[in-house]
Image (cartoon, rainbow, N blue to C red):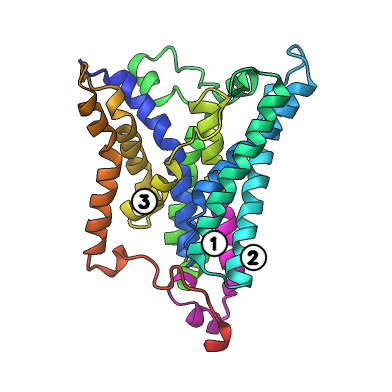
Amino acid sequence: MFDFLTFIPRAIMQGIPLLYGSTGETLTEKSGNLNLGIPGIMYVGAISGVIGAFFYESSVSPETFNGLLAVLITLLATLLGSLLMGLLYCFLTVTLRANQNVTGLAMTTFGVGFGNFFGGSLIKLSGNSMPYLALTNTSLAFQTKLPSADTTGWFGQLFLSYGFLAYLAVILSLIAAYVLKRTRIGLHLRAVGENPATADAAGISVNRYKYAATCIGSMIAGLGGLYYVMDYAGGIWSNNAFGDRGWLAIALVIFTIWRPNLGIISSFLFGGLYILHMYIPTGTNLAIKELYKMAPYVVTIIVLIISSIRNKRENQPPASLGLSYFREER
């Protein structure tokens, strides 16, 4: 029998990194920047947090370990690493006007290599004979549940049994949706993404909005990488374990038609599809299990096809998405 009480929480936990990544990428794309470096940024965000947690855990004894301080150090390291990646992308594409597609792909390759290099170095420093690094104490601090999670039955299991980063992902998504739709800043940002020349003529600083949206989006995406390591993986870092979640997060932006609030349910749906093969009994037929593993990618392809034939303007990407802005051509 299919165990929904076990499946749904794991699907939500699987979808939280996708929600962080899609929220960050939506903000970025609304400014006209197509950041295909999100997978690399999530990877750098994860390893930056791991570095901060590792050196803190190594510098204190178990008796003097402070969970709050560990969380703050890890978060700051993640945000700093992700911010630097966002600044690098903006410098190359906004200031130097490099091709956004090539830059994003290069940053993904760089981010994965950066994470694997420092991840492997930390594993050696820890003296662990196994090819992974365990940050148990910091992970437990991130996984702290709400007080009533264990006393409210199925309701607590479905809605209250997650670490604070899971609820933060939902809050950030709702805030992003409100800012984009209801505030002057959001209006200016959408104007920059649709027609930067007109926005510039109206006195809006195009470069400033592109830098701000991309850097904030990168920091949000980096938190997705941190969540995967500290919450979903239980504080275990191993090279190349993050998989293709960053690419699914980019596909999720199209699936949600550039609306962060729709990303909440959509990310949980994708998260469920990602682990569906683990919960549907297939017996000894491995071919059926492999078909179930294809589910999120089949859905992604279908979404891309549907989005490409939509005629409504509000369902289309920003008009200047992926294009560099040359003020001299205004």
Where is residue 309, by image quadrant? bottom left
Amino acid type of disc 3?
Ala
Q: Residue 263: give x, y in percent of width and height.
A: 37, 46
Residue under label 3: 251
For this orientation, the residue located farthest to the bottom is 329
Tell me the CA gap for discs 3 and 1: 18 Å
Nearer to us in this view, 268 or 278: 278
Report if residue 210 lies within the magenta region: yes
Give the residues in magenta. 192-218
Confirm or deny contact between disc 3 and disc 1 (CB under 8 A).
no
Classed neighbour count for the residue bearing mark 1: other residues with Cα under 10 Å, few (<14), some (14–19), many (≥20): many
User: Up-down: is 177 above or below 158?
Assistant: below
Residue under label 2: 91
Q: Residue at x 30, y 43 (%)?
A: 297
Q: Residue 198: give x, y in percent of width and height.
A: 48, 82
Q: Residue at x 23, y 22 (%)?
A: 280
Tell me the CA gap for discs 3 and 2: 25 Å
Q: Residue at x 56, y 36 (%)?
A: 226
Left/right of residue 279 with respect to residue 224 in the rendered view? left
Where is residue 53, by image quadrant? top right
Q: Tell me which numbered mark, 2 or 1, is placed earlier along the sequence.
A: 2
Classed neighbour count for the residue bearing mark 2: other residues with Cα under 10 Å, few (<14), some (14–19), many (≥20): some
Q: Which mark is residue 103?
A: 1
> In this view of the protein, can residue 184 be seen by the observer?
no
SS type, badge 3: helix
